[in-house]
Amino acid sequence: MEFLNLFPLTIYKSALGLDEIVRKNLIQEVYNQEKESKNNEKKMYSERSSWTGDVHGHEYLYKEKKFEVLYDLIEKHIIKYIKKIGYNEEKIDLYFQRSWATISRKNEYISYHNHSQSHLSFAYYLKKDKEQGAINFHDNYKQNEMVPGTFDSISTRAADFVKLNGMNAAQIKIEPNEDDIVIFPSKTFHSTSPSESNNERISISADVSLISKSSNKIEKFITPISEWQKFK
Ligand SMILES: [Fe+2]
């Protein structure tokens, strides 16, 4: 007898190896960005949502000189991830298209969402306590769900109609360490649980696009951006 688990979602998780002193400097830099934004504007969205730099004028962190060493390291990990999936990195140009910091304080969280305008995304944990949960991934396909709605129903779970295991989990929590990076397809829905720690958790996220180096004889990849023409 065999049970064949087909069509996996593959998430990359690894220590990044950022120098300790550089990491501490970047933490300070993110706090500075937050401070400056709070001086200038009210907190956006709800009171329990985390502070995110992208809506406060810091949506291109990779352009900031202090962060250069961070993105150089991240590029290497992203290449490993796409190669593992089977993409040929020699035929593909990768672009950071936006990147920002997130600060989560006690009881703050990021709701369920995906990044549908990009191809792959990551979260890098610049500052994080051991016991702070980090990121939940949600399965929208639920290939094994025979009775609709039963894999993510709280009552069904509570009444023990479905015993939780890896074949029926509708969401899975990943708990990275400080200095870990987690990379995933941007279309994957994810969220964070409310932070229970009195310390802040700081992560850096980005959206990355995979663009073909050549459009010759292929239909599906985005054509090289150098060939595009903006409307006059
Ligand atoms: Fe996200």
Image (cartoon, rainbow, N blue to C red):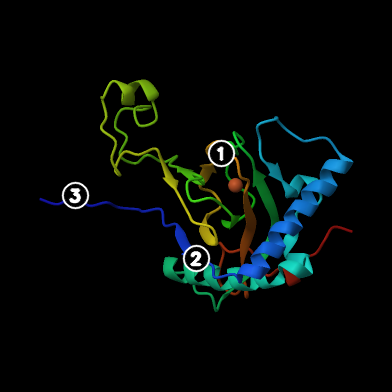
Q: Earlier in the sequence, mark 1 or mark 3?
A: 3
Q: Nearer the viewer, mark 1 or mark 3?
A: 1
Q: Position of residue 93 (x, y in %)?
A: 62, 72
Q: CA distance from mark 3 to mark 2?
A: 33 Å
Residue 3 is marked as: 3
Report which residue position mark 2 lands on.
15
Q: Position of residue 150 (x, y in %)?
A: 34, 27
Q: Residue at x 80, y 64 (%)?
A: 229
> Is residue 21 found left or right of 169 in the rendered image?
right
Q: CA distance from mark 2 to mark 1?
A: 22 Å
Q: Residue at x 52, y 43 (%)?
A: 189
Q: Residue at x 63, y 55 (%)?
A: 205
Q: Residue at x 48, y 51 (%)?
A: 130
Q: Position of residue 176 (x, y in %)?
A: 48, 54
Determine crowd level at label 2: few under 14, some 14-19, many 20+ residues with C-alpha closer than 10 A.
some
Report which residue position mark 1 lands on.
195
Q: Position of residue 107 (x, y in %)?
A: 59, 33
Location of residue 198 with respect to 79 vertically, above or below: above
Residue 156 visible from this viewpoint: yes
Q: Nearer the viewer, mark 3 or mark 2?
A: 2
Q: Earlier in the sequence, mark 2 or mark 1?
A: 2
Residue 127 or residue 214, whichever sits in front = 127
Residue 57 or residue 188, whichever sits in front = 57
Q: CA distance from mark 1 to mark 3?
A: 37 Å
Q: Is mark 2 within 8 Å of ligand 1?
A: no
Determine crowd level at label 3: few under 14, some 14-19, many 20+ residues with C-alpha closer than 10 A.
few
Q: Earlier in the sequence, mark 3 or mark 2?
A: 3
Q: Is mark 1 within 8 Å of ligand 1?
A: no
